[in-house]
Amino acid sequence: MKWMMPLLTATAILSVHANENPEHQKALIEQHKAIADAHRAAAQCLLSGKNEEVCHDELAKTCKGLAIGKLCGMKHKH
């Protein structure tokens, strides 16, 4: 449990810092909107009847440089 204290402290500091910096907050909001738009487009792709692999390839292209991981940092099970 000793390892949790530095993690919790760092999380609290980053959380407070983000709220004190309006420009950072604005950038964070825009980033989340972009990620959500990319996932919405992937959902529309799947709804259109395209293969999951095709839709994931499109999502990977959209997400490149946008978020962590090939699929914008979201994980789910199959």
Image (tube, helix red, strand yellow):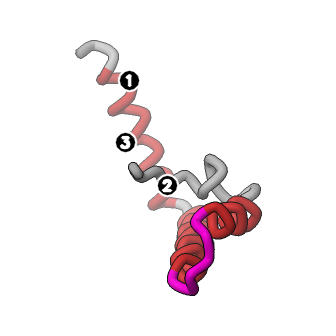
Closer to the camera in the image, 56 or 14 = 56
| Badge 1 amino acid | Pro
The part of the image, by quadrant, that contains residue 32 is bottom right
Alpha carbon distance from label 3 to label 1? 10 Å
Report crowding for label 2: few under 14, some 14 to 19, many 20 or more residues within 10 A (C-alpha).
Answer: few
Residue 70: percent from left, percent from top:
66, 51
Q: How far across and down, in percent of the image, does residue 27 sit? A: 62, 68
Q: Residue at x 60, y 57 (%)?
A: 72
Mark 1, secondary structure of its residue:
helix
Q: Is residue 36 left or right of residue 13?
A: right
Residue 28 in sight in this render: yes
**In this view, the mark in front (2 or 3):** 2
Nearer to us: label 1 or label 2: 2
Q: Which mark is residue 6?
A: 1
Please report contact status of discs 3 and 1: CB closer than 8 Å, yes or no. Answer: no
Above-or-below relation of 49 to 10: below
Residue type, label 3: Ala
Does residue 48 belong to the magenta stretch?
yes
Mark 3, other Cα within 10 Å: few <14 / some 14–19 / many ≥20 = few
Q: Which residues are magenta?
A: 47-52
Position of 28 relative to 45 (above/below): above
Which residue position holds label 3?
12
State which tag comes first along the sequence, 2 or 3: 3
Q: Residue furthest top?
A: 2
Type of amino acid at the residue the image marks with label 2: Met
Circle 2 is placed at which residue position? 74
Quarter holding residue 62: bottom right
| Residue at x 43% of width, y 41% of height | 13
